[in-house]
Amino acid sequence: MNNNEALEYIKSTYKFGSKLGLENILRLLEIMGNPQERLKIVHVTGTNGKGSTASFISKILIEEGYKVGFFSSPSLEVLNERIRINGQNISNDELAKSTFKVKQSVDVMLSEGLDHPTEFEVVTALAFDYYNRENTDFVVLEVGMGGRLDSTNVVKDPLVSVITPIALDHTEFLGDTIKKVAFEKAGIIKENSVAVIHPQDKEVLDVITKKCEELNTKLVISPVSSIEILDADEFGTIFKVFDKEYKISILGEHQTRNATVAITVINGLKENYKILVSNQSIKNGLLKATWPGRLEVMCRKPTVVIDGAHNFHGAKGLAQSVKSLYSGRRVISVIGILGDKDISGILSQMLPLCNDVIVTEPKNPRKLDARKLAELIRKYSKNPIIEPNIKDAIYKAIDIADSNDVVLFFGSLYMIGTVRSILKTINK
């Protein structure tokens, strides 16, 4: 199997949709020899911030000299970026090798009369195979959706289970109340282990605390309230926590909270497993960590920023960052959202900060039609420009921007990935 055949095979599994449940993935991995059981895993879930938190953790461990796998989703531009070791995407050859093994195992499942695994189950399985073959020291494993029934939750004994801020999202799968969502997220916590969490609303904290008590698991709440912001601009944030000074390059003061959760996780690894990590590695890792598509500056004059804020909580964080970083500057926004998101919540946070608005459409069947989005935006006394084609929307935004303006793309990560790829060609 070559790379093109591997990608075609993975693409062919899209038709099996998204299904929460562990029966299929457990059988698939069993046929493959359970590669996940030979990995040391830090498991990360949450509604917002889980990707950047996982990136901080991964980069700190890399700085200490460890070989670190990092599994994330969705991809912005290419599938390979979801499966990384020490910051490098899985190569096409290695992707093909692991995909071939997965396909052979899927064929065995089908011969047993079992359902075909979903795309996410296939990619999760090939990631475990790759990390095992490469003898990684650690794997930072980001949950796809939820936690309890997510394919990544085949992990029996993670070193640490991490939960970032929880809010309502994917309600059709995870439940329509914050307590139901919290129950699903808390499902990654395992017995006699360590759980590190970002501070949560009381309803959420009660669910997590109960879960930890039932499983005799140590619960550590990251001390984000003790963060002291020393300096912040559009190049990064300097802050103090744990009586030490750090700097992050990922923009947004809210990222100091994700960084503090990451430091708390590293402290947990040191205290509970005697894993060596110096404070210099923590400093270097935090500074070098990146997270594409999250307040990412693509170019300047004009300043072009992309951010995958696709729910109310994410939009609230983005709004705070825009206020602090770009106050007094004209903001031209380009918005594309999926139809099943909290559209009014997102718009209520962001539109008061936008001087000009262009609406477009993500390349996804769940997209919200640009004209319908424009109708909703007019309720906020804005008169949006409609450009359904993403490339046209990009050129329109840049064309009307002056050198001191901010062009801000936000909404669906599916749109952000397309925007990122196009902008990179423009900036060459």
Image (spheres, rainbow, N blue to C red):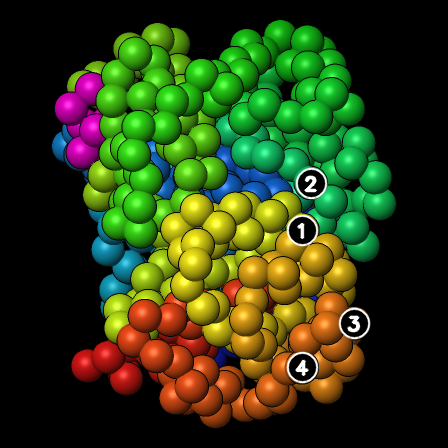
Residue 56: say if magenta. Answer: no
- Which amino acid is tagged 3? Lys
- Which amino acid is tagged 1? Phe
Q: For residue 52, which quarter of the picture?
A: top left
Decide: is 388 above or below 12: below
Q: Closer to the N terminus: mark 4 or mark 1?
A: 1
Q: Closer to the N terminus: mark 1 or mark 2?
A: 2
Residue 280: say if magenta. Answer: yes
- Which amino acid is tagged 2? Ala
Residue 312 marker: 1
For the C terminus, which image quadrant?
Answer: bottom left
Q: Is residue 286 left or right of residue 395?
A: left
Q: Nearer the viewer, residue 82 or 55?
A: 55
Q: Determine the secondary structure under disc 4.
A: loop
Q: Would you name the residue on which mark 4 appears?
A: 383
Q: Would you name the residue on which mark 3 appears?
A: 379
Q: Would you name the residue on which mark 2 appears?
A: 167
